[in-house]
Amino acid sequence: MQLLLILGIVFAIGSVTFALQNDLPVTVVLGVWRFDSSLAVVLLAAVCLGALIAALVSTPSVIRGQWAGARLRRQLASLEDDKASLERRVRELESEAAQRSPAPVPEPAAEGAAPYVGLKSLMMAQEETNPK
């Protein structure tokens, strides 16, 4: 913000210096209209007219951008509300699932437990005990 103020002061000093050094009378003729003034006033009027035209041309896009920003903020708020309600629903379902699920089967201790006997070894042991 301070940089803009400094730039504005420098521009104003330059403009005053320009106006004091260019005080020659000029005549501007546009169709039937005739205007006599100093060169600085004519240039200042031309710059102001250019700024006004630029502002009028850019206004519709600025307004569209503001509308789009407002629409996106509303959409973001709606999506955040949806997210919060879905997170609450997930927590409810998780607590409900935790209440309904059966207790987990404890695994046998590694030291005193019998080793796993595969299906093949069970079949082979059965064949040895029941000879044909």
Image (cartoon, rainbow, N blue to C red):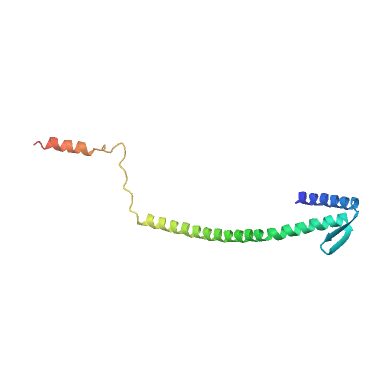
Residue 98, how many percent across, how many down?
Answer: 38, 54
Which residue is rendered at x = 50% and y = 57% of the image? 83
Which residue is rendered at x = 37% and y = 56% of the image? 99
Q: Where on the picture, by quarter, is residue 65? A: bottom right
In this view, the residue in front, 56 or 115, is: 56
Which residue is rendered at x = 22% and y = 39% of the image? 119
Q: In this view, does 57 lie to the left or right of 98?
A: right
Farthest residue to the left: give it.
132
In this view, the residue in front, 15 or 103, is: 15
Residue 111, how many percent across, how many down?
Answer: 30, 36
Which residue is rendered at x = 53% and y = 61% of the image? 78
Q: Where on the picture, by quarter, is residue 36? A: bottom right
Residue 43, how many percent across, how many down?
Answer: 83, 55
Q: Is residue 72 left or right of residue 53?
A: left
Q: Is residue 99 left or right of residue 34?
A: left
Name the quarter where the C terminus is drawn: top left
Farthest residue to the bottom: give it.
32
Image label count: 0
Judge whether 21 appears above or below 55 on screen: above
Farthest residue to the front: give it.
31
Q: In this view, does 111 lie to the left or right of 37?
A: left
Residue 17, how many percent across, how many down?
Answer: 88, 50
